[in-house]
Amino acid sequence: MENVQLFLDYANINSSARMSGYKLDYNLLLNDFLVSLDEGRFLTGAFAYVPKDPRSEHSADREIEDLANSGFLVTSKIGVISGNSYKCNFAVEMTMDIMRVATSNKPDIIVIVSGDGDFIPLVRELRKMGIRVEIASFYNSSSRELRQIASGFIDIDQYLNNQDDKTNDDDNLDQLTMISNYDEVVKNDN
């Protein structure tokens, strides 16, 4: 049995999903695809890093609660206004937490759910420590070098395509669903 620690860069993955027309069910993604006991992988920790819009600090409360209910330990912080949007980078916090876990818990596998090239030096260091590092992301929105230096790459597009097939077969739209106009759904949810 291999022990797995998972770190989710929520803004990076959620943005990529939205650009692809998807709304992710993070519970299913975590438990059905990224970590599976059937494959001899045992999840010992799941961490999510969620930015908060400084113009509406509670707008992410539902997402944070859903992630927590899915088993993630959520860290959030308020971003900084930048033009018509805001910025909130978690690369330093994630790197510090990942290195702490790597040295204290010594997991067999660390899964970084992000396509951000900022994690390239971290992945190199973890691999030098003998830890298998998997990157889970959308292929087209992930750093090519990050995919290449990782021990393995998990293509979330593949998972979504498999889920679409299951949804069509089972006619069960409660699972992961492709949404043609994500922005309208989000507005209706709020």
Image (cartoon, rainbow, N blue to C red):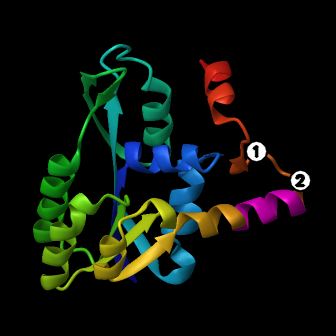
Q: CA distance from mark 1 to mark 2?
A: 9 Å
Residue 5 highlighted magenta (yes or no): no
x and y, in percent, of residue 113 in the image: 39, 60
Whether residue 138 is visible, yes or no, is: no
Residue behind mark 1: 174
Q: Residue 125's quadrant in the figure?
A: bottom left
x and y, in percent, of residue 116 in the image: 31, 58
**Between 11 and 49, the one nearer to me in the picture:** 11
Q: What is the tally of numbered marks visible in this picture?
A: 2
x and y, in percent, of residue 103 in the image: 10, 70
Whether residue 121 is visible, yes or no, is: yes
Query: Looking at numbered disc 2 in the image, what kind of residue is underneath it?
Result: Asp
Q: Residue drawn at (42%, 33%), measured in percent from left and top? A: 64
**Between 7 and 90, the one nearer to me in the picture:** 90
Whether 105 is drawn above or below 86: the answer is below
Q: Residue 32's quadrant in the figure?
A: bottom right
Q: SS for tag 2? A: loop
Query: Looking at numbered disc 1 in the image, what kind of residue is underneath it?
Result: Asp
In which quadrant is the N terminus drawn?
bottom left
- Disc number at residue 82? none
Q: SS for tag 1? A: loop
Residue behind mark 2: 171
User: Of all residues shown, which one is farthest toward the top?
Assistant: 55
User: Of all residues shown, which one is farthest toward the front?
Assistant: 83
Whether 103 is drawn above or below 74: the answer is below
Stretch in magenta: 162-169
In which quadrant is the C terminus drawn?
top right
Q: Is residue 43 left or right of residue 184?
A: left
Whether 24 is drawn above or below 151: the answer is above
